[in-house]
Image (spheres, grey):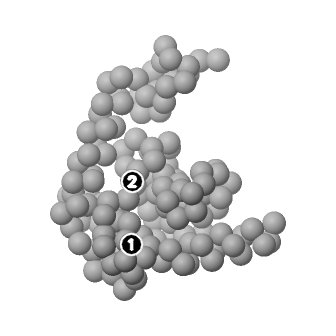
Amino acid sequence: MTNTCARCGRKLKDPTAEYGPICARKVAAEQALAEQQAANITIPVTIRDGYAGTRTPDGSVVVRIRNGVQEPLRHLVHHSPTGFEWGYGGSGPADLARSIIADALGIIDPAIYQEFKREFVAGWGDRWEISLEQVRAWAEKRAAAQ
């Protein structure tokens, strides 16, 4: 089985790697920049615990909110090496859904986060927020329906 870089598509020598060494450094640098931008922006929200995002002239910012304190949401890179996105059903929204579900529920299950992407993330506009309670209630309702 050949493994290819999730960013550039080149063949990788390491069958367990997700990125080649150069792309891995670029992804890390892009994540650091996004986290720095998010750390410098406070998004006006109505929730105390949850997640929020907004589009700025410098790009998209996503924060995790706990007890009213905002911090950058950690990007669990899997589908999109270029960062979080929302408002459609692509790789950036998939990573946003994956990161929210992992943070809120402590699990990474493609069936769950892809469904969350379709039901929530794909429909979000330029500014959004979702409470931790809403995410957990959605997951409980989904589990009960299974």
Amino acid type assigned to the residue bearing label 2 in the image: Arg
Residue 50: image location, x then y, percent: 44, 73
Residue sitting nearer the eye, 43 or 2: 43
Image quadrant where one finds the N terminus? top right
**Circle 2 — which element?**
loop
Q: How far across and down, in percent of the image, does residue 68 sit?
A: 33, 78
Give the left or right position of residue 24, taking residue 107 as reference.
left
Whether residue 122 is visible, yes or no, is no
| Residue, disc 1 | 66
Cα–Cα gap, marks 2 and 1: 14 Å
Q: Residue furthest front?
A: 67
Q: Tell me the element at label 1.
A: strand
Comes first in the chain, label 2 or label 1: 1
Q: Can residue 112 be seen in this view?
A: yes
- Residue at x 34%, y 65% (from the top left corner): 63
Give the left or right position of residue 122, taking residue 127 as reference: right
In percent of width and height, residue 7 lies at 42, 33
Q: Which amino acid does label 1 sit on?
A: Arg
Q: Nearer the viewer, mark 2 or mark 1?
A: 1
The image quadrant where one finds the C terminus is: bottom right
Q: How crowded is mark 1: few (under 14 residues within 10 Å), some or many (20 or more)?
A: some
Residue at 45% from the left image edge and 47% from the top image edge: 76
Residue lying furthest bottom in this view? 46
Pick whichever, 127 or 43, lies toward us: 43
Q: Is residue 26 left or right of residue 139?
A: left
27 lies above or below 94: above
Q: Quadrant of residue 21?
A: top left
Q: Name the residue under label 2.
A: 74
